[in-house]
Image (cartoon, grey):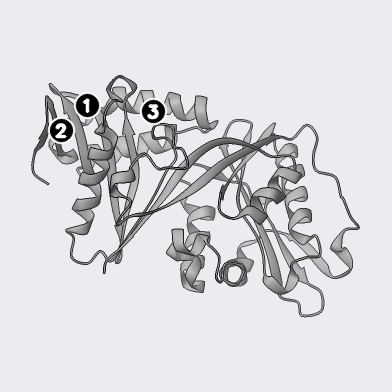
Amino acid sequence: MGVQTAGALQIVDLRSIDPCAIDPLLAEETAEWRSLLDWDFSKFAALVRRQMEAGRLNGAALLDRGEVAGCGYLGIENAKGLIVDLYIRSAWRKGAIEELLFRVLLNTLIATARVCRIESQLMLPIAVTESPVRSTVSYYVRSYLRLLMTRSVDDPPSRNRAPPAQTFQIESWRESLHDSAAAVLAAAHVGHIDCRISEQYQTVAGAARLLANIVHLQIADTFCGSASFVAIDRLTASPVGLVLASFVADGVGHITELCVTPEAQGAGLGYELLRQSIAALRQAGADRVTLTVTAENRTAVDFYLRSGFREARRFQAYVWERG
């Protein structure tokens, strides 16, 4: 990535700058994640700093007379490129600066021959509306509106129907359920809009990698096994539903995954999994719970609204595919 200029600004390879130079940006981004998203960004910020010091972090930095005004980080998994994060400091949020940095990151990945697909979910760029900020790149990058939703645990969801206990048995998460839970995750997402956003939902192997990341990687959150459950069909002894939960900050739980296979839907199982997870998060110290959902998935959005969640913020997911 060569040096690019935009007026007085320069966009340079992230590896060309002193790691200390991004400390003010990381501090500002950490504060904004907490105030706007109720999320503790400090673990991820510390990882970024360590990777910078080791010279292993790919991406671009936006410089204004030597000061870091913005950063974006890249990753590659097999044939998939990731724009992991993009952040512009508040004093420089004007014009099309954010879009310019996004384009540089995108084009860097497109120029990588083995990259056939690019994904990105950027939760903290400047306010996103139904028409994406980056409208000028949307002709070859598909965008999907996503919602961050939140609710208090002070009034946990009550059973609005008889529990589905006669047919299903709900068990606490355990590692031995990993493979069958991956099959549930993939089966529940066949033809689902989220398959377009993340290729990991498209296969059982991809779902297994996603589960492993949620349970073990814990870069920006902490998995909460006590608030994660698997629903088992008593007749077939097969898992048919799943809820996974994490803590994303002190007192803030997050529903990472909630899904039910098509044959088990309509019996209130998803609601019961959510109810039990929220109750367990409350017991573990949460006073509020968040989740994310694709806005186009109106069935899920309406379900969460009925379950006491409200919209807290909008952001975009982006997908590019070669050819």
Q: Residue at x 54, y 54 (%)?
A: 215
Secondary structure beneath dot 3 equals helix
Amino acid type shown at disc 3: Glu
- Cα distance in 3D space between marks 3 and 2: 18 Å
| Relative to 73, residue 236 above or below | below
Q: Which mark is residue 110?
A: none
User: How many discs mark residues in the rendered view?
Assistant: 3
* Residue 52 placement (x, y as % from top left): 24, 38
| Residue pointed to by mark 2 | 17
Question: Which of the 4 image quarters holds residue 321?
Answer: bottom left
Horizontal placement of 32 versus 14: left or right?
right
Q: Secondary structure at mark 2?
A: loop
The local crowd at label 1, few if under 14, some if 14 to 19, many if 20 or more residues have their Cα within 10 Å, is many
The spot of residue 82 in percent (x, y) is: 33, 53
CA neighbours of label 2 inside 10 A, class few (<14), some (14 to 19), many (20+): some
Instruction: Give how far apart the Cα atoms at labels 1 and 3 are.
Output: 13 Å
Q: Earlier in the sequence, mark 1 or mark 3?
A: 3
Please name the residue that numbered disc 3 is placed on: 29
Mark 2 touches mark 1? (CB < 8 Å)? yes
Three-letter code, disc 1: Val
Name the residue carrying label 1: 68
